[in-house]
Amino acid sequence: IPASRDRLRIAIQKNGRLAEPARALLASCGMGWRESRDRLFCYGESLPVDLLLVRDDDIPGLIADGVCDLGIVGRNVLAEQDGARIGAGRASAFREWRALGFGACRLALAVPEGWEWKSPAQLSGKRIATSYPALLGRWLTREGVDAQVALLSGSVEIAPRLGQADAICDLVSSGATLAANQLKPVVTLFESEAVLAGPIHALDAARGELVELLLRRLDGALRIRH
Ligand code: ATP
Ligand code: ZN
């Protein structure tokens, strides 16, 4: 993919919960695309705005590296990766530009249904499985709880049944997945929805104008939806 500086590039999820609503939102801003055969890249035909179809976890890094100008990603992913950067002594490189009103969920601490939940202190010495070590770590520090964090990239909710962990910290929307695994949510650590993410600093002049146009249309589309 050539690094064209006159066209705008937006990263969205290729498959998954945010893929379809992200495209629908951009289409409602008057964008239309021609898809490449490998389904990695969508060439914008009505505006000089192209889409890169990727895993959601890659979107903050693509913005940080300047490979993409903007991205549509869960606030949870953005906050986790920003927290990881800060924890590693690096500066923030991306931020939320707009909340988009879909993909709502929360990062919750969940414990076995049999536990009588009283306070975070109960987690001292326990093992908590999560894919969000930075957000969980920040909360544990704030609560003054000394717990072990087990990093899992997926299927976090089965960890207690497997004896891998005592509790979990995972994304929840309806709570059905937790219930199916005999877990109950006890604390919300973070509220999330899909967001438009961009760099910390403004874009250069040519693409800056394109971004202004896109944001005006996006704000119009978001107003109509609410
Ligand atoms: P990818 O293959 O792109 O890495 P993924 O499995 O990490 O996909 P999805 O499960 O499609 O991602 O979730 C994408 C985003 O959808 C989450 O980061 C979150 O912001 C949002 N979301 C909304 N509800 C839920 C939910 N119940 N569980 C997980 N994510 C949810
Ligand atoms: Zn992912």
Image (tube, rainbow, N blue to C red):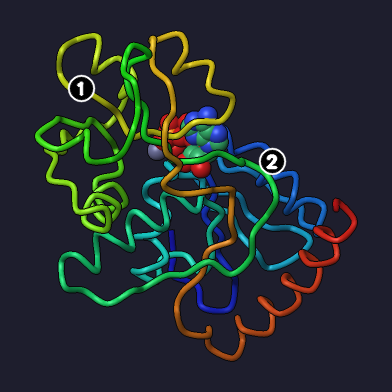
* Residue holding disc 1: 166
Task: Place residue 88 in its image quadrant.
Answer: bottom left
- Inspect this view and state whether residue 36 appears: yes
- Residue, x 29% and y 29% (percent of image)? 168
Question: Where is the N terminus found, in terms of image quarters?
Answer: bottom left
- Please tell me whether residue 162 is drawn above or below residue 9 in the rendered image: above
Between the C-alphas of marks 1 and 2, the distance is 35 Å
- Cβ of mark 2 under 8 Å from ligand 1: the answer is no
Depth order, front residue of 215/158: 158
- Please tell me whether residue 172 is drawn above or below residue 48 in the rendered image: above
Task: Place residue 141 in its image quadrant.
Answer: bottom left
* Residue holding disc 2: 21
Depth order, front residue of 92/47: 92
Q: Earlier in the sequence, mark 1 or mark 2?
A: 2
Q: Could you say which disc has been placed on residue 4 in the image?
A: none
Q: Residues within 10 Å of mark 2 (few under 14, many from 20)?
A: some
- Residue, x 47% and y 69% (percent of image)? 95
Task: Place residue 6 in its image quadrant.
Answer: bottom right
